[in-house]
Image: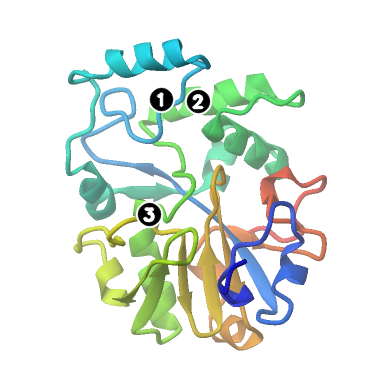
Amino acid sequence: MTDTPRRLEHPNLNAQLLHWWMRDYDHVFVVLNPFFRVPGFTPETTAWGPLRSEATTPQELEALLESLGGPQPDQAPEAFDEIIKTTGQPVRWDMIAQALGVSDFRHFARMVWLWVIGAEPPDLDATLVSRIARHCRQEGLYKPEEDWLPLVLEPMLVPYFEALRLDEVTLWDETRTSSLDCPVEALHRDEPPVALMDAPISAISAPGLLLSWSQDQVTGLLALTEEMRQKVDPARHLEGFWAGAGTSSLVLDQPRAPALLH
């Protein structure tokens, strides 16, 4: 059993968002983790993000680890996370969809998600996934970060939090057992990436607000009270859409498109 209050918990798998948080929040804005550029670097020359492999047996995994034992030709420099935060340039999903001439945004977003996490369900649109990957190679774009607070998103949160008149937020790990009170100014582009001592950052909270990420997702869930929504529309600062009555925590695995997209 956990003593974590519901207002801080990430929704259970496939839970309906508005129902999950109905006692603490009135709205949920789904934040799309941005694609991004890093001047002077590309995914082809400087790898970044989780390594995915088809290795399944212990022997295959051991061979993979041995092959990665030495320096890799495309290995990112040690301070690359700081380089991403201080110089990274976010790129909106809808701009890429527009560049590819894709009008069905829900379908596009689902294929981006499947591409990032390396899933291949029966409905995978391999042609579109290939076009997305090719476009990113041509434009030197990195995939949206998954699982945790994206580095490129940190500076994007500053004007939103400042508009809410927040001076401080709380950072949380996935299990909500480790936390850190953090001044909003620490999220500024010219500051090092924010961090917890022993775990990645899976959520940010403040009175009336929770922004949470989960494993194998490229979206953050921004739960808000009515008061916080009335203060500032998050769509002015972040790309995403409002969750509806049937939107679940698997937001990009929905049967229908979100009704409102910014």
Residue 18: % across, % down: 74, 69
Is residue 43 placed above or below 176 in the rendered structure?
above
Q: Earlier in the sequence, mark 2 or mark 3?
A: 2
Q: Nearer the viewer, mark 1 or mark 3?
A: 3
Q: Are marks 2 and 1 in contact (CB under 8 Å)?
A: yes
The three-letter amino acid code for the residue at tag 3 is Pro
Residue 140: % across, % down: 35, 31
CA gap, disc 2 to disc 1?
A: 6 Å
Q: Nearer the viewer, mark 2 or mark 3?
A: 3
Q: Which residue is mark 3?
A: 200
The three-letter amino acid code for the residue at tag 2 is Ala
Q: Earlier in the sequence, mark 1 or mark 3?
A: 1
The disc label shown at residue 133, or none? 2
The three-letter amino acid code for the residue at tag 1 is Arg
Is residue 58 placed above or below 128 in the rendered structure?
above
**Residue 68 located left or right of residue 177:** left
User: Who is closer to the viewer here, 121 or 256?
Assistant: 121
The quadrant the N terminus occupies is: bottom right
User: Who is closer to the viewer here, 257 or 172?
Assistant: 172
**Residue 90 located left or right of residue 66:** right
Residue 122: % across, % down: 76, 23
Q: Residue at x 66, y 39 (%)?
A: 110
The disc label shown at residue 137, or none? 1
CA gap, disc 2 to disc 3?
A: 27 Å
